[in-house]
Amino acid sequence: MHRLAFLIGLLLAATVNAEDPAICTFGPGALPVDTLPPGTPHGSAIPINHVVVLMQENRSFDHYFARLHARDVDRPPREASNPSALGGAPIEIFHERNYCAVADLDHGWNGTHREWNGGAMDGFAIENADPADLSGSRTMGFYRKRDLPFYHALYRTFAMSDRHFCSMLGPTFPNRHYLLSGTSAGHIRNDLQIATHTSIFESLDTAGVTWKVYASDLAFAQLYAYVQAHAANVAPIAQFYVDAAAGTLPQVTFIDPIFFGDETNQNDEHPPNNVQVGQAFVYGIVQAMFQSPQWPDSALFITYDEHGGFYDHVPPPPACEPDAIPPNLQPGDVVAAFDRYGIRVPFVVVSPFSRRKYRSHTVSDQTSVLRFIETRFDLPALTKRDANANPLLDLFDFAAPPFMTPPKLPAAKINPDRPGCPG
């Protein structure tokens, strides 16, 4: 059934949903001044001196914001559905009332390609059927404002995107590699291998730009040999709050949540972890930035590494292949290239310069964050993917910043009484 549905999707994509290819004009080494339209600010013309990047885990845009109360946001139709793995009536999207009862879904290379299904976006339920959920319905659940009040307020207030995709149709590690280096260097799985290819950290050091990684337990960046050789640049998350309060954050900061806690102590939002616990963690980071003396010249980017197997209705468009390294396929793997973005994920920019209630509809991905850093500090592109990435400048108002005084947002409360959540 999986293979037949996948082949049908490919046929439909080829005959009905013809697409324009990605525009890949520029290559590695391209400087922002060479790739941006004339007159576009770059370097010190951008009044942001501290960039903070917080990447959470495994949630699609529709899973969190199918009912976001905001104008001009691409939300799924109320009757959006997927074919059931059991046949019969399709499974419509529904309000998920459990905050931590959804087990981990399929978001690997093969599973995600079948969920995407050639652009039909109808393989989610079929791919996620298992003995505990024969129909695969759990992928179709979404949360409301009452479940995630802080997130809904944050995304309604600041500039967000409803066209931000993860970087490839696959799992966590390869997508996080794209954030740090513009490529997965062929990886399509969560391979525990030391990365030796060039990352943003070498570029920052070459340009004399300060950086640090703050980790709740293990920083993903520590998979890079270069970061391992610069251990002083990795600090525990508690130090982030100290540095933010003291105004001593570096020019570029990456923040990682807890990856390896127990079921009562995981704030990364990876299923089946309590989404409200993850929301509270992000709330703490945002409040630390609001209260920091560095707030007036900072930008905090918040996103998710990939969709975690949860449904989204927007087909990811074609993307630039980052380099000449092909996917490291094994026998039986879906044959595809790194020429398409992954499933859509939430994305918001929290900054004094963030446009008020702005909704970007310009395609971006994790390498767009990389390209923003390169644009601000006049750094060369690492790969063809980040060289051609949208640098996210449309989300900012540098001339009249709306949020020099941080707005008041609802607290991120944790309800311990939800079914499926530890007491």
Image (cartoon, rainbow, N blue to C red):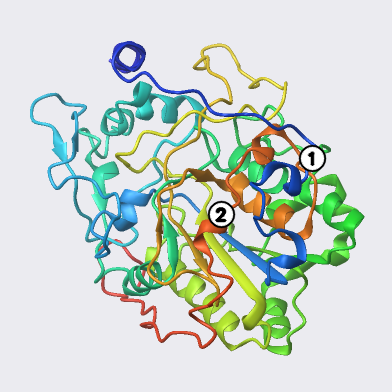
x then y, percent, for residue 397: 53, 69
Calculate the distance from the C-alpha at mark 1 to the C-alpha at mark 2: 30 Å
x then y, percent, for residue 349: 52, 65
Is residue 234 found left or right of 22 in the rendered image? right
Which residue is at the front of the view, 355 or 384? 355
Query: Considering the image in quadrants, where does the C terminus appear?
Result: bottom left
x then y, percent, for residue 334: 49, 17
Label ID, residue 216: none
Q: Secondary structure at mark 2?
A: loop
- Within the image, what quadrant is residue 288 found in? bottom right
Q: Which residue is mark 1?
A: 194
As drawn, 327 above or below 41: above
For disc 1, the neighbor class at 10 Å (few under 14, some 14 to 19, many from 20) is few
Looking at the image, tell me whether mark 1 or mark 2 is earlier in sequence order: 1
Query: Considering the image in quadrants, where does the N terminus appear?
Result: top left
As drawn, 96 above or below 196: below
Find the residue positioned furthest to the left. Answer: 89
Amino acid type of the residue tagged 1 in the rendering? Ile
Q: Which residue is mark 2?
A: 392
- Within the image, what quadrant is residue 307 found in? top left
Confirm whether residue 102 shows in the render: no
Confirm whether residue 167 shows in the render: yes
x then y, percent, for residue 169: 49, 32
Q: Residue at x 60, y 16 (%)?
A: 330
Which residue is at the front of the view, 187 or 349? 349
Which residue is at the front of the view, 112 or 294? 294
